Structure formats: C-alpha cells, structure tokens
Image (spheres, coloured by chain):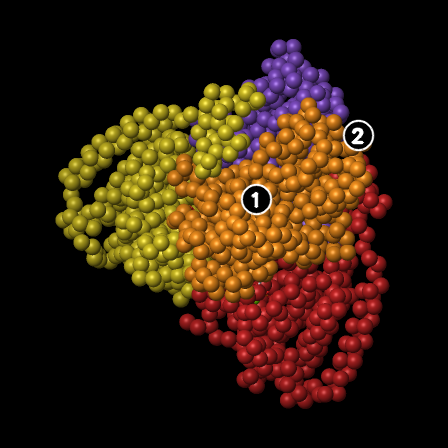
Chain colours: A orange, B purple, C yellow, D red
Amino acid sequence: MVAEKARVLNMVQAINEALDLALDRDKRVLVFGEDVGRLGGVFRVTEGLQAKHGEARVFDTPLAESGILGLAIGLAMGGMRPVAEIQFAGFLYPALDQILSHLGRWRHRSRGRVGLPVVVRAPYGGGVHTPEQHADSPEALLAHAPGVKVVIPSSPERAKGLLLAAIEGEDPVFFLEAIKLYRGSRAEVPEGYYTLPLGRARVVREGSAATLIGYGGMVEVMLEAAEVAAKEGVEVMVVDLETLVPLDEDTLLEAVRETGRAVVVYEAMRTGGFGAEIAARIAEGAIDYLQAPVVRVAGYDAPYPPFSAIEHHYRPSAKRVLAALRRVLTH
Amino acid sequence: MVAEKARVLNMVQAINEALDLALDRDKRVLVFGEDVGRLGGVFRVTEGLQAKHGEARVFDTPLAESGILGLAIGLAMGGMRPVAEIQFAGFLYPALDQILSHLGRWRHRSRGRVGLPVVVRAPYGGGVHTPEQHADSPEALLAHAPGVKVVIPSSPERAKGLLLAAIEGEDPVFFLEAIKLYRGSRAEVPEGYYTLPLGRARVVREGSAATLIGYGGMVEVMLEAAEVAAKEGVEVMVVDLETLVPLDEDTLLEAVRETGRAVVVYEAMRTGGFGAEIAARIAEGAIDYLQAPVVRVAGYDAPYPPFSAIEHHYRPSAKRVLAALRRVLTH
Amino acid sequence: MKPKVVQYLDKGEFPLGEGEALSLYRAMRRARFFDEKALTLQRQGRLGVYAPFMGQEAAQVGLALALGEGDFVVPSYRESAMLLARGLPIHTLLLYWRAHPAGWRFPEGVRAVNPYIPIATQIPQAVGLALAGGYLGEGWVVATSIGDGGTSEGDFHEGLNFAAVFRAPVIFLVQNNGYAISVPRAKQMRVDYIARRAEGYGMPGVVVDGNDAVAVYIEAKKAVERARKGEGPTLLEALTYRLAPHTTSDDPSRYRTREEEEAWRAKDPLLRFRRALEERGLWDEEQEGELLAQLEEEFARELALADSVPEPQPEEIVEHVYAEMGPDQRRAWEALRQGKHVEEVW
Amino acid sequence: MKPKVVQYLDKGEFPLGEGEALSLYRAMRRARFFDEKALTLQRQGRLGVYAPFMGQEAAQVGLALALGEGDFVVPSYRESAMLLARGLPIHTLLLYWRAHPAGWRFPEGVRAVNPYIPIATQIPQAVGLALAGGYLGEGWVVATSIGDGGTSEGDFHEGLNFAAVFRAPVIFLVQNNGYAISVPRAKQMRVDYIARRAEGYGMPGVVVDGNDAVAVYIEAKKAVERARKGEGPTLLEALTYRLAPHTTSDDPSRYRTREEEEAWRAKDPLLRFRRALEERGLWDEEQEGELLAQLEEEFARELALADSVPEPQPEEIVEHVYAEMGPDQRRAWEALRQGKHVEEVW
Ligand SMILES: Cc1ncc(C[n+]2csc(CCOP(=O)(O)OP(=O)(O)O)c2C)c(N)n1
Ligand SMILES: Cc1ncc(C[n+]2csc(CCOP(=O)(O)OP(=O)(O)O)c2C)c(N)n1
Ligand SMILES: [Mg+2]
Ligand SMILES: [Mg+2]
C-alpha cells in the first residue's frame, strides 16, 4: 500500500500531490472551485494542476457555492468523479441545502441506483489570524447530514492517503483541512500513489492515565499536552479519529475503556459540536469503565472571534487540555 | 402571568392565537413567509391574520428561504420584529448561510449594537406520512449556530406562551413546531396574552427509577412510555427540555442525578443530533450518579424514510423508549 | 421590449408530421389518463399525497418527446407526465406516489432521475449532469423543469449562470402556471415573463403558449438542437395553468376564483390539440375510444403489478445510505431485520 | 441591445456645483490617503489582512455622497472608502482592520452597518433594512454594494427579486472590477454587463463608467431619488478596476498582466477627477498640498487614537452573544475574566 521513498512535505504539498495523482490515474476526476485554476487556490493547494491537466479538468467556477455543490452532484450522477474545493469551510453554508437535501440522500432516495462519488475539500479552523468568518469548524453540521462521510486529516502523509481513498470511494466525502496545518505541519510523505482506509481511528500515542480524543488540527495540540504531562510522569493516550463519519466506535471505546478517563478536544463551538457525539458514544458504550467526567475542551459558545489579539483564548490549547486532564485525573 | 379563562385548543390554534396577540400588541411585529397570507399557511397556522392585520403586516414572500431570512434580518436591523415562517423545517437549509453567518452573529460582530429580534417558525418532524424531505428535524444544526436560541414546544399552552416570549425577546429564536402535534395535541390554553420563560427545562412527570429526556413531539412519546412503565410498577421521571439553547443544564443534571439513569429521546438522525449534546452534558455533569449507560433513542443514521409503510420504525416510539428503559434499568 | 409568445394552434399552423403529432397526442392523453386515475386512487387511500399536473401536459410531454434517446430529464415533483413520456413504467410511478421504496428505484435505461422535492435544487445538478455527457463523449442533452415559484430561489440563478458559463447542453423548462401554491405570479416577481431573465445570463429565452403542444414541441426541438450543437442552454418558459389542486392536500378555492379556473379549462391543452388533430382529419372519436380502451387495459395491468409488489421491510430504512453499510447502519439493520428496534438488541 | 455606459468626464461634461464637486474630490482623496496609509501600516504589521479599494474610489464615494443623512449603507469588505465617506471615524476603521473588537462597534449615528464577509449575504438584508424604514415612517434609502463575483451567488438573485417585488428603496451598486479574486469576468458569466440582469427583475439597470466620479454621483443621485419617491430599487453597475491586490495576502501578478494594470492606472478615477477640476479652475496644486497636510494631520491624530485603545480582554470573546448572557457564556466569561480558561475552574 505504501510507496517506498518519502520526502518531507507540508500539508499543502501533500494534498497537491494527491490531487495530481488522482487526476493522472482516473480521467473521470475533475478538480474545480473558486480560484483553483490559474491562481492555484488561495492556499496554493491546486498549484500547477491546471497547467498540467488542462482547463477542462481543473477549472475555476463562478462564485457560488451552492452551484459548485450542485455541479458536483450532477457530474457524479453522470459518471464523473468531481473533487470540489470550497475556499473556506465557513463558505460551505450557502451549499448546505445541496448537501443536506441531496448529496447524502441520492443513493438512499434512488434505492442504490445513483451513488455520488463527490469529494469536497475545504480548509477549516483557526489559529492563524484569518479574517472574520474564515476560521469556522463546521464538521458537526456535516456529520449530521445523512449519507456523507467526514474526514479530517492531522498530518501530510495521512492527508495524502486519505484523500486518495476518498476520491477512489463511491460515497460523498467531506475532507476538511486544518488551515493551521497547511504549512505548520511537515512530515515524511511517501512518494507515489497510496491510500489509507477511511473509517478507522488511530491511537497516535499510548498511555494509561487517560485518553485524549480529537482530530485534525487538535491532534498536535493533544500531543503537545501529552508531552507536557509525560514530563510530569503522566502517560496519556491520544486518539486521532481521522474519520468522523462513519465513526470507528470500537477503537474509540476500547481506548477509553483502557484508561477510564476521557477528554474530548475540538475547536468548533462547544454546544452541538462533534465532541458531543464522541462524549455521547462514550457515555453509552464505556460507562462501566469511566472513573471521571467526560470533559470537552472546545471553542466557547460564541462565534470564532475575529479579534486577533484574543482569538487564541477561543481555540483549544495544550494548556486547556492539560487543565481538563488535571480535572479527570484528580476526580 | 397566566390569564383566567381557558379553552381546549390544538397547537395550530394556540400558535395562531399567539401570533394574533403579538400583532395586536406591537406594531413592529410582522408575519411573513410562503403562503402565510391569503392561504393562511399550508397548516393554517396563520389563518385569518392577513384579513385582520392587513397585507402590509402579514404577507406572502417569493419562494426563497435565504431571501426570507435575509429580509427578516434586515427588518430587525431596522427596528422591526419579524416573525418568519419557513414552510417545513427541511426548507431551512437554503437559509442556513443567513442563519449561520449572520442571524446569530450580528450582535457579536457589532459588539452589541445590532441585536436581531427575529423569530423563525417552522414545522418539523415525522409521524404523519408527509412527502419526502418534509419530515426533517434539523434542531441540532440550529443549536450549533452561535447566537441563536432554539425552542421546541410540546403542547398548545406551552407553545402559545413560549412563542409570545420569543417575539418579546431581543434575540433570534427558532421555534420548531412538531407537525404531529399540530392537530394531534389538544389542551386547555389560557385566553389572552401571557408569556412563558425561555431557557427552562420542565419535569413533566416525577419518578425515581430513571429519567427520560426529550422535547417537542417526543414528550408525548416519553409520557406514553412512562405510563406503560408505571403499570409495571416502574415510575420514571420525564423531562421536557423545551428550550434547547440556552440549555437549562441545572434542571437536566438535577433530574439525572436523582435517578442515576438517563434515556435521551429525539427523532432526528442519531449521529450528531441534539441528544448527543444532552448525553455529553450528562457525561460531564452527572457522571458520579450514573448507574447505567446513557442511552439515546433516535432516528437511525439515514434520511427520514419517505416510505410510509415503514416510516414509523424510524421515528422513536414508546416501545423503543421502553426497550431503552429496560436496558438502563437492568444494567 | 415584450417577448413574443410562440403560438401555433390558434394561428392554425401545424408544422408537424402525422406520426409526430399522433405520438404527441397519445402521450398527452396517456398522461392525463394517469393523472385522473391517480387522483381517484388517492381519494380511495391507495396513493399517498399526489401532485397532479392536469393542464400542463403539453409543456411536459412536448419537451420530453423533443429529446433524443440518450438525453436525460431532471424533473421536479409535478413532472409525472414528463416521466411517463420518458418511459418510466406506470407501476413504478404508482409505487413512487404510494411512497413505496420500489417506486424510488427507476429502472436502468430510463433516462430520468428521481423527482426533486426541495425547490430549484435540480437546476445546478442538471448542469453537472449535462457536462458529464460531454466529458464522457456521450454528448447527451439534459432537460430540467421548474415552476414559476421556483425561479425565485438562489439555485435557479446559480444554475442558469453556470450553464451559460460552461455552455452546458441544458433546456430549462419553466412551467409558469401562475402560482407557487397560493402565491400568484405578481407577488413572486415584478416581471411579466420569466424568460426576460435569460438575456441576463447570455442565453436565449423563449416564451411559448404552454397549452399549445405544437408550440412547446417545436421550440423544445430547437432548443435541443442548439444544445446538441454546442450552442449552450435555453430558458423555455411555458405559460400554463394547473387545473387541479397543488397537491391532494391543497384547496385552491382559498386563493383563486372559479372564473379563472374555467377560463383556463377552456384552454385545456389536451382538448386544444385534439381539436387541431380532428380538424386535420388525424384523429376521431373512434380512435379516441380505442386509445382509451388500451390505456384502461394498460393501467389495470400496471396497477396490478404495483399491487403485487410486497410491502417494504423495516430494514430498508437504513439500506443504501452508503455503498457499503457503515457500523451504525449495520447495527440498526440487524435489529430491524429481526423485527426489532436497535434499542432491543444492545 | 447593448446598454450604454454613462460617462461625463471624457465627454467634457460636468453638471456639478462647485461645492458638490469639491466635496466629492476631497472625500475621494481622503479615502485614497487612507488606503495608502493602511497598506503601509499593514506591511509594518500594524494592521491585519487588509482589502484595499484603490481605483474604486469614484464608485464608492460617488454613491455614499449621493445619499441623504438618514440613509444607510450596507457595505462589503472592500467598502472602506464608502464607510469613510459616510462618516465612520478613521480610528474605528483602523481598529476594524486591526481585528480589534472596538473596530466592530460602529458609533451611534453612523448610518452604516458592519462590512459583510460572506459574499452576497448583504443583499437580502439590505432589502429588509430598507423596508423597515417604510414601516417606521422614516423612509430611509439603503445603498448596498457587491462585486462582480458576488453577483453569481443565489442571495444576489433572491435579494434583487425581493427588492423588486416589495418596491424597496434600495440601490444595488455592483462594483464590476473585472475579477473575483483571480477569476476574470468572462469565466464568471457570459454577459458583458451585469446590469442586463436588471430587466429580468423589473428594475432599472444602469451602467456607469465607475472611474468617472461625476457619472457615478449623478446616476446614484437619480437612483436615490427614484427610491425615495417610492419607485423602487435600481441596479447600478460601475465598471472599474482594483489597482491593488485583492487583499494584502494576494499576489495579482499570478492572474493579470502588468499591461492591463497600467492601462487601468491611466484611468485612475482620482487623477481623472482632479484633472477635470483643475481644467475648470476648481482645484490646484496648492489646494492639493493643503488637503494632504490636513489629511496627514487627521490621520496621525486618528492613528494615535486607535493606538490608545487598550488591548481587548479575553472575556470579550463570549460577550454580546445574546442580549443577556446565557449560562454557557457566563461560565466561560467568569473564567476568562479571571485570566483562566473554563477548563481550569470547573
Ligand atoms: C426549498 C423549498 N421550499 C418550499 C417548498 C414547499 N413547496 C412545495 S411546492 C411549492 C410551490 C412551488 O411553486 P412553483 O415553483 O410555481 O411550482 P408548481 O407547484 O406551481 O408546479 C412550495 C412552496 C419546497 N418544496 N422546497
Ligand atoms: C460565500 C463566500 N464565498 C467565498 C468567499 C471568498 N472570497 C472573498 S472575496 C472573493 C471574491 C469576490 O469577488 P467580487 O465579488 O468581484 O468582489 P471584489 O473582491 O472584486 O471586490 C471570494 C471568492 C467569501 N468571502 N464568501
Ligand atoms: Mg407554479
Ligand atoms: Mg470583483
């Protein structure tokens, strides 16, 4: 599955490579969105793809997200494999009707006849002083849409393999990319084509004192907290969910049962965030093992603040994760 | 607070009366939406209001939900008190951008200068063989929108008072009305103007064996289950949340602490539904009291099925609640 | 500048071959027959909520027959006539309106997708489907349909603009029947004709007498030809009227007058077309009788077929959510298959 | 039919009073001054991401000055010039671009709302705001602004249609600067002028040379007058160009040529207007020098004011979510106020 050679890439480069490989491999793959063509995307994720694969397969759309999703759905109906980019995850909102009413329902409403292999990529999350409404984390909205999958990678090498798997798959997938990791996360990425399975959570650090659970941009935050805790002699387990839907409940529950203590970390607004679903699954499936409250570390119940001097108070930090950890450990 | 006389009304009549009183009381109140004028709404909730209050204050809009929400926001900005109807809750989706990006953010982004006293009413939920996509329960999406309130009444007299409070208030409120209750729920409703406070959960039945928690159309289902359980000698408590946001966590946790066992009931798709938030709050705030898993009874992870012969399997029933109850009681 | 309304029948023009004309009439008659039967079945409790199309047969069938075999229709909920004309079996359509899952799976080979309920969402999807045909070298044309009310939605705008920009081979049929449920045209928009919007997208906009089957058919043919030649989309507005309620749950007497209904009944597209055929000696009472007998027989057969389909099973609720069932669906499926709910089998 | 592009300056026409003309020039000059300062501050790390408007002053200021005192502007992110012309204090605008909460609370009395980031969402809101003025008997007019790119969004369509249906007193200014970030007009739409869409809504559509301050001002005045007389909305398209990057994060050399930029620089609306004033003896080098000195002084004062505003406090994050703080915000607020996070104080 994994190619031989590897080089250090950041997330932008890894995703760019995945798109390039997918375009090479399958003529039905199309890449489109606002500014993805000549400009190569506002984050340069699609840089060079139009020049290489042509304007027919990598193209700019008019500024209309519902149109972009509708176009993707229709193309997939007709047999193509569209990979659409939405410029920022907060701009998925105008497309939510297409997503909630259609993207995830066509297979069900056509009783299996019309499946939609659509991938929608969008940068999400905060931490890098983006303008107002550019730092939203809407994964919970997507996870509550029937029939779609939601994947959020935490590193370049995972991103590449997961994206290729998403494009290969038969179902619609939202692929959310933490803006903070675009250039902030660098790692060895295998060359060539490889896929990583969707629907599997990963234990990215072992530990028996407690279990930290999160995904995407929060994985490095959890690992940082775990590092600090380890210096104090406390070894905590860290779980990267990677795929939110379909959720790998088995791995999640196993990880919590092992330690009996769980902290759930996400950067969206706390109420109604996907961390609620994680906590709910734990409260049902691991109750007999729990020795402490399931604590959520999340954005506050307010919009992500566009106020750069204080925005870091909103997005969960290692310090906040450690405070939560202290709470579950001293309970 | 409560007027003297009361008559038996159904939910449609009670809400109609509330709207009529609000229009009488405050000239800034406007009622609009698709077919709310001459037709009186597809469920007749606005029947007679245009004839009485005039076409300027009760009017039809073009068929465009984002436009309706945008219009409401602008009217509220300018000092009016719009009460918009969305014909079915599943048709809120085209308006989600206005809701997520704006309705709940204006107060925050204007640092308190521009508050939006907008009420959005929409019928939701299943159980009455509506056509495809007419039975959605999108409360979790709204509850995850910053800055909005979400209210779901469970009976005519509560609906009237809560709606009048929502219209009086200074914040945007989603007011979801269970279609099943429109004509299926009848109760004594006080005459005249009265309000019931938002943000308070209610214990609607006492019991010490376990706590059933739900809202809207699920309250009668929980009460039915409680009734059956009582016949078997098991007295369970039933909590009607009524307001999902802001959530009355104190009442919720108190109710669970008293019994140590919780079943959460909602008709939306299970994953990412608002019941996850309830379970998560319990898992954090009542963990030391819990003697059993927190079990969710909800729609399955699929679209609400438009297949009338089998749709009743999707929507939680007293039978399913009882099964969940058995599980938490025998744990 | 007022767009002209394309009209043939009243002007006595009839530029159709006999075969074409008869196919068109038969398909319209068959559709009307279905609509009447469906309304009856619904009253008997043998269908669910039903959206009749009576009065709009010329628009729907005229467009459907203008398409080629490989072309697609992307219909809204009111397009049963269009679906029938595209070859959707009657029993499938009955099962659809019976809210039976078997009515949701259209047979392979039928170049039509399931009807859309959320208004206007089909518009950008139709554009994507049309472009897919180009990528795959199959060059199919797509015809999609929307009501006057639906043109107020954002998706209508986004879809038309996309179609123009990408020169997609799409025909956007607007069946302007004057009402969005109860809301009359004048409260939906401040223009006389929706086709006035076409110019703003850079595509041709054509207004036809939607109760004139010849006009719809001819103009639809032209639009299909343009699309097939790579000249892009057309907005085709058919002025028409629904002679029945919005759906079987609706009571139109609340929002329109009997006089208005009667005036439009006089313009019934089926009768107008039949009259024209009769005037030209292409149709007579006897043929009509034969056709009705055939239709009666066909319908009885198809109804029996629909009736013979077993009741759906509860576990079908969670089937076809994903290509492969996820763990959450699996758990529910196992339970439902055993006649239980998931709460009973934890 | 090609719409005509309204033009005054190049035709040598100048139907403005001296006072009006000078106010217009001064406001444009002041805006440009701000833009240049802002770009410098941004490079110094003293502002956040900034969206310059250079080149679009005539469109923005021309419209702003055509409004009356009680009228509102509903701007998008690029409308700093419009906001300045409407009386938003410079220090507030600086704080806004500094991503400081104090820049988000516009002072009472300034008839402008906060700029919109999600494209086109302002359009239906502007309609509602305009209608509110009618209900309250205050009859204000609303001017809202959008880019060429933004016209592709569904909200643009829904908003314009609502405005037409309800005859709302709104001016929709489209600043057609030829690009949506990197995407040129021809890839956004298949029409030459966006104003062609106006007819489809039943409202007047006017195209002006957006770099001709006189043309924008005069046509905006007419539109405001129509709105105030109850004649409904106008779509006013200003053909213009942004001479600077999309935002300070953008690199326009990736998608447009230096020649194109130079060609437009020659049509700089500020220089063109100044030349016209000079030709008429209404302005000279000395006056320009004086004005610049004033602007320099004003800006220094305002910058100092902005600098003097204390850093925001963490608890401001959860303030103003509701009129009264809910329990979830309260808990967070108490913690943040103590310099802690909510996790530390359970
Ligand atoms: C997004 C959305 N909003 C509202 C509805 C409810 N609804 C169903 S049909 C209809 C009116 C449609 O009118 P029109 O487009 O003219 O089509 P017609 O029914 O006249 O064929 C409405 C409001 C819906 N199905 N979808
Ligand atoms: C709904 C939405 N989608 C995407 C964006 C990202 N975005 C910001 S500006 C812009 C281009 C806007 O172009 P135009 O409307 O022409 O305005 P201009 O920037 O040229 O003034 C885009 C795509 C956004 N802010 N909102
Ligand atoms: Mg209609
Ligand atoms: Mg532009």
Residue displayed at 31% across by 25% down: C308
Which residue is nearer to you in this view: C84 or D40? D40
Q: CA distance from mark 2 to mark 1?
A: 33 Å
Horizontal relation, residue D321 to residue C103: left or right: right
Residue denoted by label 1: A151
Q: Residues within 10 Å of mark 1 (few under 14, many from 20)?
A: many
Q: Which mark is residue A331?
A: 2
In the figure, residue D269 lies in which quadrant? bottom right
Amino acid on which the number 2 mark rests in the picture: His
Residue displayed at 28% across by 42% down: C87
* Residue C172 visible in the current orientation: no
Residue displayed at 39% across by 31% down: C100
- Label 2 with label 1: CB-CB less than 8 Å: no
Which residue is nearer to you in this view: A287 or A210? A210
Horizontal relation, residue B184 to residue B233: left or right: left
Counting from the top left corner in percent of width and height, residue A79 is at 39, 48
Q: Residues within 10 Å of mark 2 (few under 14, many from 20)?
A: few
